[in-house]
Amino acid sequence: MKADFHMHTEYSPDSQMPTEKLVARCLEVGLGCIAVTDHDTIEGALEVQRVAPFTVIIGEEVRSSDGEISGLFLNEMVPQGLSAIETARRIKEQGGLVSVPHPFDRFRRGSINRGALEDILPYTDIVEVFNSRNNLDADNRKAHRFARHNNLLASAVSDAHTALELG
């Protein structure tokens, strides 16, 4: 099964992808499981889950005060602006998984800061070791070394904001 655990819909302020286009593209490229991780909302994920004929994980890319943290398998939205540790706790309290998106991307403003990354390590389940929007492969390799060193699950994601980026 092909899966992608980081993508956005029109519910994210930086994406214009309607849910219908996302679903159609996932079917076209053979994705059988996705996680929709819009910025600071689960509404897009709930909408995609309602219409998709494949598995949709409810996720959210939360803008904590220390950088972005993704929650997967969420039941409710996690508010933005909390500390990284409080964000991770709130994800775990609802039985979710904590995923660290693009942790070492040196060009992205939203990447988690290094101190917070260490602070949330006890809560972290997954590290994105390949994010297709990272400009430098060295940043992906650094994330891979970090995940391996800390015995964390590794994911490779599209971080799609447009339909063509999916798959």
Image (cartoon, helix red, strand yellow):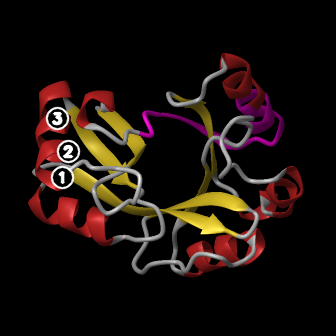
Residue at mark 2 to residue at mark 1: CA–CA distance = 6 Å
Q: Position of residue 12 (x, y in %)?
A: 38, 59
Identify residue type, mark 3. Arg
Q: Magenta stretch?
A: 143-159
- 100 horizontally vs 35: left or right: right
Percent x, y for residue 136? 66, 20
Question: Picture coordinates of residue 112 (x, y %)?
Answer: 73, 53
Residue 32, quarter of picture: top left
Residue 167 visible in this rendered orientation of the protein: no
- The residue singled out by tag 1 in the image is 18
Q: Residues within 10 Å of mark 2 (few under 14, many from 20)?
A: many
Q: In the image, 88: left or right of 25?
A: right
Q: Nearer the viewer, mark 2 or mark 1?
A: 1
Residue to which mark 2 is pinned:
22
Say which residue appears at 30% left-offset and 71% top-offset. Answer: 43
Please identify the quarter of the rendering in which residue 27 is found: top left
Label 3 to label 1, Cα distance in Å? 11 Å
Q: Nearer the viewer, residue 74 or 44?
A: 44
Check whether the beta carbons of the residues at disc 2 and disc 1 lie within 8 A of each other. yes
Element carrying mark 2: helix
